[in-house]
Image (tube, rainbow, N blue to C red):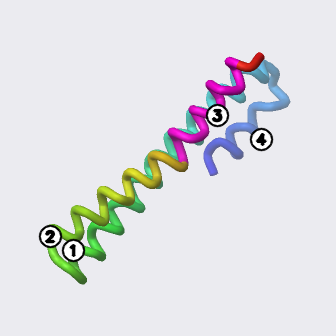
């Protein structure tokens, strides 16, 4: 919620580029924290249900999927778009 609140408070005060830059960084930091929390939850639940080896595998798969879908694919799409311009 921090990027939305920051945007609402600061938007009318000017320097819109700075507002967007700061809100974007807040958003990415929040998404990284959410990814860590989700991976930790996957590890914790799978460790309780299955054991250590399986929980490490599940957590690793979770990290890879989140990293791929949330970060790698968008960054790749951005670099492909910038190359075509």
Q: Secondary structure at mark 1?
A: helix
| Mark 1 Cα-neighbour bin, 10 Å: few <14, some 14–19, many ≥20 | some
Q: Nearer the viewer, residue 83 or 48?
A: 83
The furthest residue to the left: 52
Measure how far apart labels 4 and 3 are at the Cα level.
29 Å
**Residue corresponding to mark 3:** 77
- Residue at image coords 71%, 29%: 20
**Residue corresponding to mark 2:** 52
Mark sitting earlier along the chain (3/1): 1
Between circles 3 and 2, the one closer to the viewer is 3
Measure how far apart labels 4 and 1 are at the Cα level.
42 Å
**Residue corresponding to mark 4:** 8
Q: Position of residue 65 (x, y in %)?
A: 45, 54
In the displayed structure, does residue 85 sit left or right of residue 61? right
Q: What span is in magenta?
A: 70-83
Q: Are marks 3 and 2 in contact (CB under 8 Å)?
A: no
**Secondary structure mostly seen in the magenta stretch:** helix
């Amino acid at each position: 919620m921090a990027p939305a609140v920051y945007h609402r408070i600061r938007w009318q005060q000017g320097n819109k580029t700075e507002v967007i830059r700061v809100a974007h960084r807040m958003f990415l930091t929040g998404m990284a924290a959410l990814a860590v929390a989700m991976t930790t939850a996957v590890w914790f639940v799978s460790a309780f249900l299955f054991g250590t080896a399986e929980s490490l595998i599940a957590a690793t798969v979770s990290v890879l999927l989140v990293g791929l879908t949330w970060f790698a694919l968008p960054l790749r799409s951005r670099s492909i778009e910038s190359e075509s311009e």
